[in-house]
Every structure is written in C-alpha cells, then in structure tokens.
C-alpha cells in the first residue's frame, strides 16, 4: 500500500474547496426557499386564488381522477414508444438520402428535402386532423380506421422531418478527410457510411435527438383531438362531469413526471459529450 499523504498545502486547498462547495449549496438553498416563499405568498394573496385553487388544484378531485387519467396515459406511452422507433428509422433514412452524392441520386435528394420542408412547416395539429379525419373519410379498402393509428402516423411524419435534419447535421459534421481515409483503406461507400460516418454522427447528435423525444412525449397528447381516450381526453371527460379543471392538472403532472427522467438523461448525455462549456450546464 502506498503511504503517500497530501501535503499541508494540498490539504488546505481541499478544505478551501469543500468550504466553497458548502457555501454555494447553502446560498443556492436559501435563495430557492426565498423565491418559492415569495411566489407562494404572492399568488396566495391574490383575490381570486381561493377560486383558482378550488377549480384547478382541488386535491380530492385530483385523487378521484388520477386512476382514469393514468389509464389514459398508458396509451400515450405506448404510442410514444412505437412512434419513436419508426421516427428513428424514417429520419435516418431521409438523412442518408439527402446526403447522397452524385447526380443519379438527385431525385432522392429532392424528395428528402421536400419531405422535411413540408412536414416541418405544417403544424402538427393540422397533420393530425388531415390524417385522422381526412383519410378515413376516403373510405379506401384495406386502410385502418382507428384514430390512434392515424394520430401516430401524423406524429411519425412530423417528427421524422425534424429528426432527419438532426441526423443530417451529424453526418455533415464528419470531416471529409475521414471519408477519404476510409475509402483509401478499401472501404466502399456503404461501408464508410456504416462503420465510420454513422457511429460518429449518431454519437454527436444524441443530446438533440433525445430532446426531440422529450417533445414527442409531450405532443403525443395531441391525438386526443381525434377522440382517442388518452390522458388528455380522459381528463376532458372527467372535467365535463363537474367543470372542475383539476383532472387536466393531474394529466399535466403525469406528463411532467414522464418528461423529467428523459430530460435528466439528455443533460447527462450532453455533459458527457462536452456540450456544456464555460457558460455552465443545466441545473
């Protein structure tokens, strides 16, 4: 075993850093408590707060609506998981099509560019309406009529356009010299893309990619406009019984509870990738 001991100067430095860490923690805690107290006192002293509390933050009504809203949330989770897989596959395919070189691939590049331009420009709610109400109205044989399926398709079409641009940014960020080095080693274009470009590109865009999936988790609640009994629709039905909006707040809190772990995972990945520099990272 080593008998090394830090010097007195080093021990003094470590003690100084511990004191600074404790001091920073105390200041952060006190300032947070003061801010929360000011918000509670400020909002609670408003004339309309008792009515707002009864309408939006009724604890008994929230507990009563929680099982129904949570059951609807399970549908949102399933829709999000299935859509996330399809979005990654479609988004990566579009990104690869748009980065293909050579005049023979010009139609594919045009298609990928038009796809991303159109679906990034269209509001998601409009796409959900068009697919959820418009396609079943065509009465085409062989197509499903379930609203949840068309709501999911709308999410996939819209979010794959965003994810495709994220992947394309990662692919374009790889220096051309790496492609040249791979080709000089005898790798084909497909092998270069698979073994050299894509692994680095995906690693670089992982934080913004996870950020898109945080938004997808939230926007999965928009399929409620098609009549699907998800968390938002379940809260709407509960609210219609007594015009108390607490079930909506319960649904919002459940979505936040789902979002926070994925957000923290995004921050952790971003920190490992060195995305936060001298300006400081997230809280």
Image (cartoon, rainbow, N blue to C red):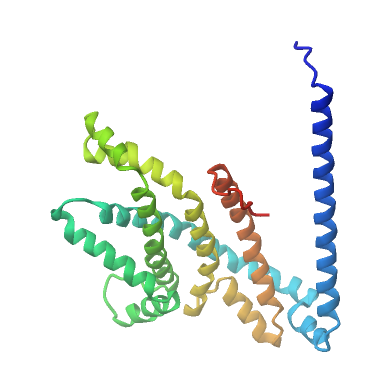
In the rendered view, tell whether residue 108 sits above or below residue 244. Answer: above
Residue depicted at x 29% and y 52%: 96
For the N terminus, the quadrant is: top right
Where residue 215 sits in the image (x, y, percent)? 52, 64
Q: Nearest the camera: 87 or 134?
A: 87
Q: How many marks?
A: 0
Residue depicted at x 66% and y 61%: 257
Residue depicted at x 66% and y 76%: 248
Residue 214, image quadrant: bottom right
Where residue 209 sits in the image (x, y, percent)? 47, 54
- 10 horizontally vs 242: left or right: right
In the rendered view, tell whether residue 172 sits above or below residue 153. Answer: above
For the C terminus, the quadrant is: bottom right
Residue 240, image quadrant: bottom right
Where residue 86 sits in the image (x, y, percent)? 39, 57
Residue at the extreme front: 9
In the rendered view, tell whether residue 25 sits above or below residue 1. Answer: below
In the rendered view, tell whether residue 243 sits above or below residue 123. Answer: below
Residue 125, image quadrant: bottom left
Residue 68 appears in the rendering: no
Where residue 246 sits in the image (x, y, percent)? 71, 78
Q: Nearest the camera: 144 or 221?
A: 221
Residue 150 appears in the rendering: yes
């Amino acid at each position: 075993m080593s008998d090394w001991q830090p010097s007195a100067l080093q021990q003094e430095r470590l003690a100084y850093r511990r004191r600074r860490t404790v001091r920073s923690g105390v200041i952060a805690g006190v300032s947070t408590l003061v801010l929360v107290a000011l918000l509670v006192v400020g909002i609670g002293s408003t004339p309309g707060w008792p009515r707002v509390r009864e309408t939006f933050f009724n604890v008994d009504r929230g507990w009563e609506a929680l099982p129904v809203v949570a059951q609807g949330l399970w549908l949102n989770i399933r829709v999000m998981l299935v859509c996330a897989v399809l979005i990654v596959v479609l988004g990566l395919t579009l990104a690869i099509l748009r980065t293909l070189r050579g005049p023979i691939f010009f139609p594919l590049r045009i298609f990928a560019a038009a796809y991303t331009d159109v679906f990034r420009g269209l509001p998601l709610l409009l796409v959900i309406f068009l697919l959820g109400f418009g396609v079943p109205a065509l009465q085409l044989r062989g197509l499903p009529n379930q609203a949840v399926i068309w709501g999911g398709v709308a999410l996939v079409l819209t979010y794959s356009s965003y994810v495709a641009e994220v992947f394309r940014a990662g692919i374009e960020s790889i220096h051309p010299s790496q492609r040249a080095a791979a080709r000089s080693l005898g790798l084909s274009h497909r092998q270069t893309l698979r073994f050299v470009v894509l692994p680095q590109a995906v690693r670089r865009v992982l934080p913004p990619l996870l950020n898109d999936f945080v938004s997808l988790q939230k926007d999965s609640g928009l399929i409620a406009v098609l009549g699907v009994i998800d968390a938002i629709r379940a809260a709407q039905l509960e609210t219609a019984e007594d015009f108390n909006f607490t079930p909506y707040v319960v649904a919002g809190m459940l979505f936040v509870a789902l979002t926070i772990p994925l957000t923290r995972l995004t921050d952790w990945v971003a920190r490992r990738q060195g995305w936060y520099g001298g300006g400081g990272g997230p809280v």
